[in-house]
Image (cartoon, coloured by chain):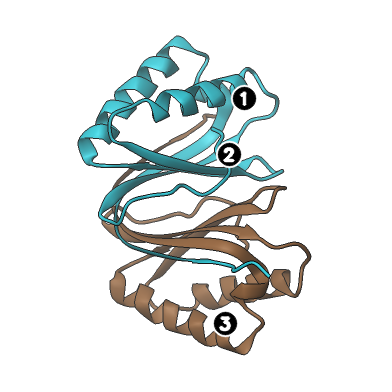
Chain colours: A cyan, B brown
Amino acid sequence: MSASSFSELPEPPYYVVTFSSQRTEGHNGYLAMGQAMAELAAQQPGYLGMESVRGEDGFGITNSYWKDEESIRAWKRVMDHVAAQTRGRAEWYSRYQVRVALVQRAYGFTKKDG
Amino acid sequence: MSASSFSELPEPPYYVVTFSSQRTEGHNGYLAMGQAMAELAAQQPGYLGMESVRGEDGFGITNSYWKDEESIRAWKRVMDHVAAQTRGRAEWYSRYQVRVALVQRAYGFTKKDG
């Protein structure tokens, strides 16, 4: 998945789906799939944003943010459908872990210019 | 923060603190601080694990996992204390965002050998 930058989100409560994954060696169409999935996610009802990063060792974390549980379930059905049509997770990931969580509070810091 | 691998966690519910950040240029003692903070976190009551990754562009996500809100609040007091004693966030990060969330369900996939 792409989107290696901050999502601008509403005030909590909202949901985060945090996806930790270890990539296998080689591309195997992964980059194109990631881009397509990110674009597809952004079209879903209840989608709020996505933040994603992968290190050189292939370990990555993607957080996607959603309005409610129903929008997460609908998105999972879309992903399962895509996975069924592609070589999918057994080829792209040696391991992954999904955690669905209700964001209760949020705060941040932005450095002032100058 | 270090720990670029999967945490072995109990069944939900538990909490995740997801920390998205953009690093400034240069090290400025950041790597040593990150290592020290990860070791300190692991000693805190209620600590369950940490997963962290940062890309080449300096954007990173660190998830730390906690038993309950009280352990998160206690850890924040420790971090604020450390930040007050160091050059801290204004030097290390151009921006960060912290989200505290209750993990309600989790599932995963591990590739079988062979």
Amino acid type indicated by mark 1 = Leu
Across and down, in percent, residue B51 comes to: 53, 55
Q: Same chain, marks 1 and 2?
A: yes
Q: Is B41 left or right of B47, judged from the image as shown?
A: right
* Residue at which label 3 appears: B83
* Residue at which label 2 appears: A22
View extreme (right): residue: B26
Give B24 or B13, whichever is nearer the viewer.
B24
Q: CA distance from mark 3 to mark 1?
A: 38 Å
Q: Nearer the viewer, mark 2 or mark 3?
A: 3
Bin the neighbour count of mark 2 within 10 Å (Cα to Cα): few under 14, some 14-19, many 20 and up.
many
Q: CA distance from mark 2 to mark 3?
A: 31 Å
Q: State the count of labels.
A: 3
Q: Output the chain of dot 1.
A: A
* Residue at which label 1 appears: A31
Earlier residue among tags 1 and 2? 2
